[in-house]
Image (cartoon, rainbow, N blue to C red):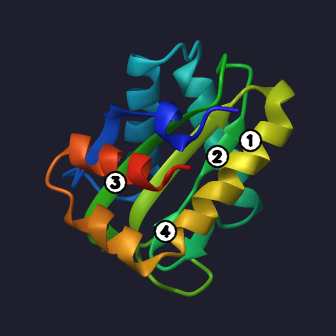
Amino acid sequence: MGGLCTRLLPECVLLDPLQQDKERVIRQLVDRLASSHSITDPDTLFEQVMEREKLGSTCLGFGCAVPHARTDSAGTTVIAAARLNPPVSMDAPDGEPVSLVFLMAGPEKSAALHLRLLSKLARLLHSDSLRAQLCEASTAEDFHQIICSRDD
């Protein structure tokens, strides 16, 4: 299946972007995926992620969100991540602002893989210690390595 570590490249990790609102953060993450992976139509991917957001919040609680889309724009399932400081309101059901965002995009035909990776990410993000480590990472490489250290 390939884990989270192989799908999240350090160059797809965004630490403390200056422009912070839900749409801008998602746009920046889509752009990171497009520049590092074979995303054929980043504008369509962005629209698909935003459409998915309209269906219901992708916030998991604990200050984490996992916006995602299955799309023909992606040849394989890939992930980008952002640490937001200060945290950003993303319409979380618990009302808490979000400090960790993981954007996942994968091909339409990979629904089972998509769900397995979403589930794995959700389980990892329930760890207080993991979230604290990610929020304290000093570089994108450190952030990536923290994810890799928990990706079994």
Q: Which residue is mark 1?
A: 114
Mark pair 2, 3: CA separation = 21 Å
Residue drawn where x is 21% and y is 58% of the image: 137
> Which residue is denoted by mark 4 in the rendering?
64
Instruction: Measure the alpha-carbon separation of dots 4 and 2.
Output: 13 Å
Q: Give the mark nearest the N terminus, 3 or 4.
A: 4
Type of amino acid under label 3: Ile
Name the outermost residue toward the front. Answer: 152
| Mark 1 nearby-residue class (10 Å; few <14, some 14–19, many ≥20) | many
Give x and y (percent) for residue 134: 31, 62
The quadrant holding residue 46 is top right
| Residue 88 in sight | no
Q: Nearer the viewer, mark 1 or mark 4?
A: 1
Residue pushed farthest bottom? 94
Amino acid type at mark 1 = His
Q: Which label's residue is closer to the chain start, 1 or 2?
A: 2
Q: Earlier in the sequence, mark 1 or mark 4?
A: 4
Q: CA distance from mark 1 to mark 2?
A: 9 Å
Residue 5 makes an appearance in the image: yes
Cβ–Cβ under 8 Å for marks 1 and 3: no
Q: Which residue is mark 2?
A: 68
Residue topped by disc 3? 146
Report crowding for label 2: few under 14, some 14 to 19, many 20 or more residues within 10 A (C-alpha). many
- Front one among 71 and 129: 129
Could you give the CA–CA distance between mark 1 and mark 4, rounded to whole angstroms? 18 Å
Q: Secondary structure at mark 1?
A: helix
Task: Tell us which disc is closer to us: 1 or 3.
Answer: 3
Number of the front mark, 2 or 3: 3
Mark 1–mark 2 CB contact (< 8 Å): yes
Report the Cα–Cα distance between label 1 and label 3.
21 Å
